[in-house]
Amino acid sequence: MLRIEKVSKIFNEHSNFQRLALTDITLSINPEDVITIIGSNGAGKSTLFAIISGALKPSTGVVYFGEEDITAKEEYQRAGFIGKMFQNPLHGTAPQLSIIENLTIAINKTSYGLRRAISKQIRAEIQERLSILGMGLEDRLNAKVATLSGGERQALTLLMVILKKPKLLLLDEHTAALDPQYSEKVLQLTQHFISEEKLNALIITHNMNHALSVGNRLYMMHRGRIVRQFAGQEKANLKVPQLVDMFTEIHDGMAHDEILLQ
């Protein structure tokens, strides 16, 4: 599905502000893999996502989708097969438009001739899809998205991403800004859609419980590198205290090594 080979990213290269954000990242996402990624702020998680989505180009290394080298492809060229969500519920929807208008754009991939695009068939499909969310939004089709709560908007954004039928989902802390009730609800919907549509997904999270309960593989990042990875039974056997201890040990150990090198 997706292969990343020896990808590094340097910001402000050849200047006094040069910063190495990723170092020799190599990973493969196999069919139906769901991978959670944890790491402290500055670990390189979002930079990795930006390179996968095409928002950033790597300084070195190659990104493949299937057998195709997509390293030079722009973000809009990858949007047809890569869907993404971010932490902020205000991103991903058009607040001045109604629920049905937002979803019609997702289905038709354009806002041109929007009113004419809302056929009876489209309306029925949208109502059916919205009912899956369990939030009553199917009865509020004409409500402006700006009037929805953060959790409702994030659930709507998730549905819009799914309606575009991506092959890979990039979810960057997409439940972090929500209250606990909506966080769990959106996570459950995420798992439902991933299973139903048989999607691949990469999920950045700071929630250790989510990191362990979701997906079949787990990556731990630190200072631009993948420092630990778990899969299969090893991941299934992990408990949150163990994961926290490993995370702390790696973080403190590398900080200690840096002090010794000074």
Image (cartoon, helix red, strand yellow):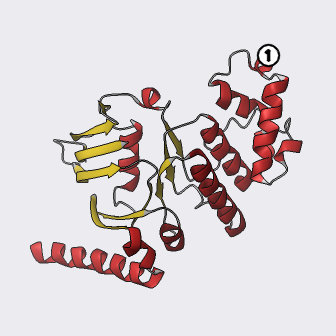
Task: Using residue 68 as the reference point, say whether residue 178 is left or right of it.
Answer: right
Q: Nearer the viewer, residue 174 or 193?
A: 193
Task: Using residue 163 as the reference point, say whether residue 250 is left or right of it.
Answer: left
Farthest residue to the left: give it: 261
Tell me the amino acid under the disc marked 1. Arg
Q: Is residue 255 above or below residue 223?
A: below
Name the residue that disc number 1 marks.
Answer: 116
Percent coordinates x, y for residue 187 in the rendering = 62, 60
Taking the spot 30% from the left edge, 29% from the top edge, the residue there is: 72
Percent coordinates x, y for residue 255 in the rendering = 24, 75
Q: Nearer the viewer, residue 240 or 102?
A: 240
Q: Is residue 180 above or below residue 201?
A: below
Task: Using residue 200 as the reference point, say whether residue 21 is left or right of it.
Answer: left
Percent coordinates x, y for residue 196 in the rendering = 62, 49
Res 231 quadrant in image: bottom left
Say which quadrant the C terminus sits in: bottom left
Q: Secondary structure at mark 1?
A: helix
Percent coordinates x, y for residue 123 in the rendering = 82, 30
For the question of whether residue 98 can be seen, the reply is no
Q: Is residue 248 above or below residue 18?
A: below
For the question of whether residue 211 can be seen, the reply is yes
Taking the spot 75% from the left edge, 33% from the top edge, the residue there is: 96
